[in-house]
Image (cartoon, rainbow, N blue to C red):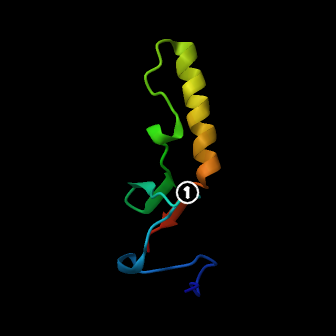
C-alpha cells in the first residue's frame, strides 16, 4: 500500500517477503535502529576468491566483488515507521 504521508510504499514486517537478486537469491540485511539496509549477497558461487595473497590482489578481488554486487541488483534502504 502507498503511504498517504509520503511517496514511500509501506508494508507490515510480518507480511514482508524480503528482497531477491536477479538470480532469485536472498539479499543480506543490516538493521540500524531506524532502517533496514539491504544489498545483494556476493558468495563464492560468483567466482570471487576472498583469499588474496597481496594488496594488489585484494584490490582486484574487491573491485570484482563490488561489480558483481551491483550487477545482482540495487542496494535498498527501508525506513521503519
Q: Quadrant of residue 8?
A: bottom right
Apparent side of residue 4 relative to residue 17 in the rendered image (left or right): right
Nearest to the observer: residue 73 or residue 32: 73
Residue 65, image x, y percentages: 56, 36
Q: Quadrant of residue 2?
A: bottom right
Look at mark 1 in the image and give the residue it sits on: 23
Compared to residue 8, the image places residue 42 above or below, namely above
Compared to residue 12, the image places residue 32 above or below, namely above
- The residue under the point 55% across, 57% down is 23
Nearest to the observer: residue 67 or residue 49: 49
- The residue under the point 52% across, 14% down is 55
Apparent side of residue 47 relative to residue 34 in the rendered image (left or right): right
Residue 46, image x, y percentages: 52, 40
Residue at disc 1, secondary structure: loop
Q: Quadrant of the C terminus?
A: bottom left
Circle 1 packing at 10 Å, graded few (<14), some (14-19), many (20+), is few
Residue 74, image x, y percentages: 61, 55
Q: Quadrant of the N terminus?
A: bottom right
Amino acid at each position: 500500500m502507498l503511504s498517504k504521508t509520503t511517496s514511500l510504499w509501506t508494508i507490515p514486517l510480518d507480511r514482508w517477503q524480503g528482497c531477491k537478486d536477479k538470480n532469485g537469491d536472498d539479499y543480506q540485511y543490516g538493521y540500524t535502529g531506524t532502517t533496514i539496509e539491504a544489498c545483494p549477497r556476493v558468495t563464492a558461487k560468483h567466482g570471487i576468491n576472498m583469499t588474496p595473497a597481496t594488496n594488489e590482489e585484494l584490490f582486484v578481488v574487491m573491485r570484482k566483488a563490488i561489480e558483481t554486487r551491483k550487477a545482482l541488483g540495487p542496494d535498498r534502504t527501508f525506513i521503519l515507521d
